Amino acid sequence: MPIIVAIDGPAGAGKSTIAELCAQSLGLTRVNTGAIYRALTLLALERGVGDDDGQVVALLPELEALRFEGRTVYLGDRDISSDIRTAAVTKAVSRISAIGAVREGLLQMQRTLARAHPEGAVLEGRDIGTVVFPDADVKVFLTASAEERARRRLEDDESSDADFEEVLADIRRRDAYDESREVAPLRPAEDAAIVDSTGKTKRQVVEEIVGIVRRKTA
């Protein structure tokens, strides 16, 4: 049976990079669930329907053209890897991903992508271990202090003209929103291992998570 590793956590905790590195180390595929929601958000913003839940939901069939090639994300023949990482998409993705019909509509896509690999998959997001794969073999809640996450965001986006306090406020705003939303709020699964990446290198975090996976699946 394929091994499913669920990595959840708040915005800016490094889930995407860590999930990719863990998948490589474990010989599993990585399903970039965040990119799926960002792709939908991008479409909604481009069509000018970001504030209309019904019209956002109506865009879901277009995601059937979504595919991944390594770190590159395609929607049909269009490379949207950079487009889904803009500040506008980052600001809007929490609200759009909180729409109940959106999350329900994308459940099967995430499960199908994860189970397609014979060895299994690593998935990261907000509700992988609580909703998408509540029966995942391994569940990890990856977190870091708000200050650490704000610093990382500034380092990752050198073109940003935002200052530290502005980014920190945005991180805290998004945390509050994700934790209090009615549909799939951000919270650790009851059986999740908590990994705090504050002050740790990527390699240290990956080694910690890979160790957890190997112990639980031995």
Image (spheres, rainbow, N blue to C red):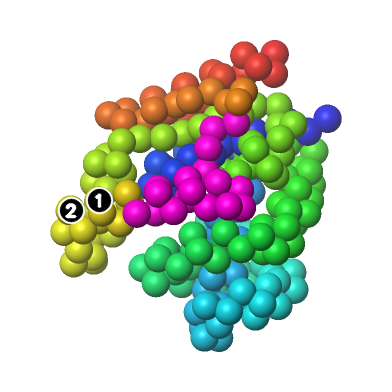
Residue 25 visible? The answer is no
What range of the chain is rendered magenta? 173-189
Point out residue 106 in the picture as x, y percentages from the top left corner. Answer: 71, 59
Residue at image position (52%, 77%) is 50
Residue 164 is marked as 2
Label 2, residues with CA under 10 Å away: few <14, some 14-19, many ≥20? some
Give the residue at mark 1.
Answer: 168
Q: Is residue 31 magenta?
A: no
Residue displayed at 39% across by 54% down: 174
Task: State the residue in front, 192 or 18.
Answer: 192
Secondary structure beneath dot 2 equals helix
Residue contact at pointers 1 and 2, CB within 8 angstroms: yes
Left or right: 64, with 197 as reference point:
right
Nearer to me, 141 or 19:
141
Which image quadrant for residue 120? top right
**Is residue 13 positioned above or below 72 on the image?**
above
- Would residue 70 be found to the left or right of residue 115 on screen? left
